[in-house]
Amino acid sequence: MVTGADPITTRELQPLIGAEIAADAGALLSGRHAKDIRALLEQRSVLVFPRVGFDDEQQIAFTQTLGVQAYENNGVAGDDGERQAIFKVSLDARINPIGDYFRTSFFWHLDGTMHEVPILASILSARYLPSEGAATEFCNTYAAYDALPTSDKEMLEGLRVVHANWALQRFLEPEPSYDAFRAARSVPSRTQPLVWTHRSGRKSLVVGATAAYVVGMEPPESTDLLVRLRDWATQPRFVYRHDWQLGDVVMWDNTGTLHRALPYAADSGRLLHRTMLQGEEPVA
Ligand SMILES: [Fe+2]
């Protein structure tokens, strides 16, 4: 892709997911490439901007060149109860009071399944990294849907899934106290189509760790289907794994992917700063 006086170059990272964009901070902040970046996001699901080194102001400005910034963070309020323009993704309670909650990010999910309109995209920048590990993985749920046999596509037609915080929390605590379970259950759940038919006409799978059960199915069949589809969608052919370098900026289309962090220790210092773009369509 070459645009205008300050061309940016791109290369594909995996056959079915990911593109790297070589551009300096100035070119990205100019907004001149915003349309091309949005188009590439739609095509490649994950965009990597190596070692751009944004500070918070630049990250916010870049985000706002691409759409309407979302200030809510997974429905989780910040430490002062206010919505934040920059969210600190860290497991360390000294940096992020709800750091422990972020251990749920070790499990494949998309953000905002319990909202009517999930966020469109997240943008992460690497501010501090441990010496090893702590990669982030993404899978393309458009490609995963497309590759399903026709019999599966027909079977999935019309199925709906309840997405619930209590289901997500079971990944962290399989045997919660009743009080803890009640607290998790008090967060409103939401029923979403299993297959998202986007306005573009493309279809993607909406599965992952928030998916509690398929409406109208017996528990064994429901769990069987949800596990099978998550396992299918996260096959290596649909996955891009990002091994972070300091200053990297990574952006993904939340509406056509699942993501997860590979486990790291709360005291490792790993710190990513996140901004988000408001969703533009409900799951339909
Ligand atoms: Fe997430």
Image (tube, rainbow, N blue to C red):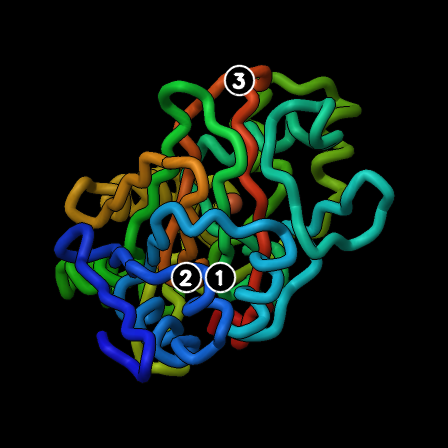
Specify few, some or many for label 1: CA neighbours under 10 Å numbering under 14, 14-19, or 20 or more. Answer: many
Sequence-first disc among 2 and 1: 1
What residue did someone put label 3 on?
A: 268
Q: Could you tell whether 153 is left or right of 161 in the image?
A: left
Sequence-first disc among 3 and 2: 2
Classify 170 as above or below 56: above
Give whichever of 126, 25 is nearer the camera.
Answer: 25
Residue 114: x, y in percent?
A: 61, 55
User: Can residue 104 be seen from the camera position used here?
Assistant: no
Give whichever of 5, 170 is nearer the camera.
Answer: 5
Name the residue located 28 percent from the left edge and 40 percent from the top edge: 241
Residue 282: x, y in percent?
A: 54, 72
User: Mark 3 near mark 1, Cβ–Cβ under 8 Å?
Assistant: no
Beta carbon at label 1 within 8 Å of ligand 1: no
What secondary structure is found at the residue carrying circle 2? strand
Q: Amino acid at mark 1?
A: Ala
Quadrant where the N terminus sits is: bottom left
Q: Amino acid at mark 2?
A: Asp
